[in-house]
Image (tube, rainbow, N blue to C red):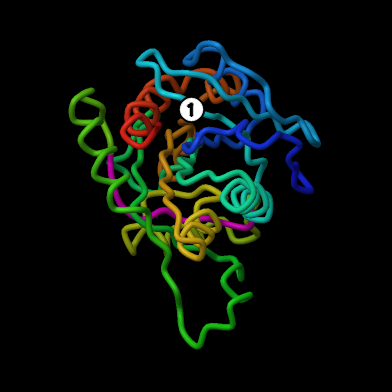
Amino acid sequence: MGTPHINAKEGDFAKVVLMPGDPVRAKWIAETFLHDIKQVTDVRGILGFTGFTKNGKRLSVMASGMGMPSIGIYSYELYTGYGVETIIRVGTCGSYQPYIDLKDVLICTAASTDSNWIGQFHINGMYSPAADLDLLIAAKEEAEKMKLKYHSGNILSADVFYDFDPNMWKTWATLGVMGVEMESFALYVNAARLGKKALCLLTVTDSFVETRKKLTSEERAYGLSQMIELSIATAERFCD
């Protein structure tokens, strides 16, 4: 068995998958937070692992790559080819709001976008994809237990990292959008179309409001422990 972009065997993936963008981060999550792990895929260097949490719940971790086309491919193949029911994206983002600080965790209730991703459905209108309600409630409850500083709301999934208009973010900010990343919209659309569950959790790594505030590349890759612990606590409610 396999799909064009995943070479795992049938049964290699758990029903719940954590999905960071970076393959290095996927490996770090698996080695740091799971035990008895097995690498199950490595096509194009996109690594996937399955193991067990400290509470004995079977859980998988797989990278998505960068951008909506990439997470669109991998989430679709996991949902349709490997029996995955739930994907929790664990990523990083830039903040658009002055009250959101570095290392705060964002629980993304819905995703906006500047992409034409939804154009494939030829909708006569505008579709706004949202996270699964059960996952949202679970994440909020677990965040409260952990006493994390978190925010919930809308996130922007952008197609462009280096925007030609440096002030475009301000329009999104006035609409209450918390910040920007590059994947959640496509994940939420795939989950909705296929009748699956999805949630995006993000750690803030830089600020558009105070541009001097940035995490280092090392902090981005390895310093996201609180979000990962939150994602695992949330995921365990939906694992086998």
Can the viewer see residue 67 in this picture? Answer: no
Question: Is 43 situated above or below 208?
Answer: above
- Between 122 and 191, the residue placed more toward the observer is 191
Residue 66 spot, x, y in % from top left: 66, 44
Q: Secondary structure at mark 1?
A: strand
User: Chief secondary structure of the magenta span?
Assistant: strand
Residue shown at 65% from the left, 47% from the top: 74
Can the viewer see residue 29 in this picture? Answer: yes
Question: Is 119 situated above or below 103?
Answer: below
Question: Is 55 situated above or below 133?
Answer: above
Q: Is residue 4 left or right of residue 197?
A: right
Residue shown at 34% from the left, 47% from the top: 97
Q: Quadrant of the C terminus?
A: top left
Dot 1 amino acid type: Leu
Which residue range is magenta in the image?
A: 151-160
- Between 35 and 125, the residue placed more toward the observer is 35
Q: Is residue 119 left or right of residue 149?
A: right
